[in-house]
Image (spheres, grey):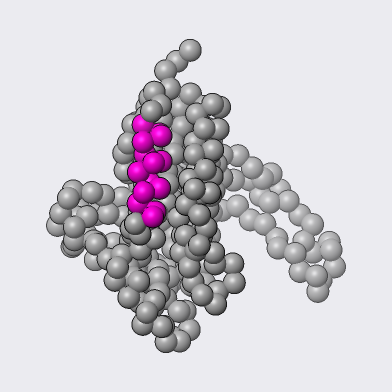
Amino acid sequence: MSPKRVLVGYGIDVDAVANWINTTTGAPQNPTNVSRGVYGATIAKIRDAGHEIGLHGYTHEYISQLSAEQQQDVLNRSIDVLTKFCGGRRPRGYTAPAWSTSKELIPQLEAAGVVYDHSFMHHDFQPYFAPDGSETWVETDHAKAAEAWMSPMTRIRASGVVEIPANWHLDDWPPLQPIPGRPGAQGFVDTAVVEKLWLEQFDFAYREYETFIFPMSIHPQVSGKPHVILMHERIIAYINKHEGVEWMPLEDMAKEFLEGRMPGVKVEGGVDV
């Protein structure tokens, strides 16, 4: 049996105040919420410690709600700001705010020279080349005859952008970030429950795969809370007990895949029509 190889890392969304002031309509934000973003603002420390800094919107824009031109403008400005901030080093990775994506996203990232994305969910534990966005489908519209939507999704075609898959079940925000008044927001889930959910996924992947990646998504204003820090300490200690574990940033996971040291998978779907 070949030895296990498990690439583990945190994708850290330093939303700071951006996600709070992204009200989409210009409606005023509660200053208390903005203060929660200040709690999670640590970018200079991250840069100075030598960590990877990737793209995550300018004001946490939900790109599925933007025109192609708006998306491009946000991407261009974000690349420019981070490149200057990081002393000329261009960002190599991207995570869509709230994992809200668009058909234009991957082509725009590829044209900009971005190496990897962390927004799609075609797989849980394997890297792959993200679809290029050319596939099409027809949403149902009950105001029309059923024949109007009964056609298959067209075939997925790969881009040159590596996908380090996203996973809502490995994200600290939904269970641990309280947002009073927002339907579906939880925020007060026991960390023991979240820990169990995350480690059961790790256990499954470790049982089923000889090689896999395990990217966890966290936010400083969530995982920086004392009770959540303790949870992460336990998760790290548990994962480190396993043979073949290597910790690395998502950028390095993408590099391992591109250079053939992490096999990954090929995502297929759709039909030629």
Quadrant hosting residue 33: bottom left
- The answer to whether 89 is drawn above or below residue 182 in the figure is above
- The answer to whether 262 is drawn above or below residue 79 in the figure is above
Q: What residue is drawn where x is 36% and y is 49%?
A: 230
Q: What residue is drawn where x is 55% and y is 41%?
A: 123
Magenta-highlighted residues: 227-240
Locate residue 133, reporting x and y percent: 53, 54
Q: Is residue 100 visible?
A: no
Q: Is residue 137 visible?
A: yes
Magenta span contains residue 195: no
Quadrant hosting residue 243: top left
Q: Is residue 177 left or right of residue 267?
A: left
Q: How many marks?
A: 0
Q: What residue is drawn where x is 48% and y is 23%?
A: 210
Locate residue 138, reporting x and y percent: 70, 60
Q: Is residue 203 left or right of residue 225?
A: right
Our reading of the magenta stretch's main secondary structure is: helix
Of all residues, the one furthest to the top in this rendering is 1
Observer-nearest residue: 222 or 162?
A: 222
- The answer to whether 170 is drawn above or below residue 60 in the figure is above
Q: What residue is drawn where x is 52% and y is 58%?
A: 189
Observer-nearest residue: 51 or 96?
A: 51
Locate residue 158, reporting x and y percent: 51, 43
Magenta span contains residue 234: yes
Quadrant hosting residue 238: top left
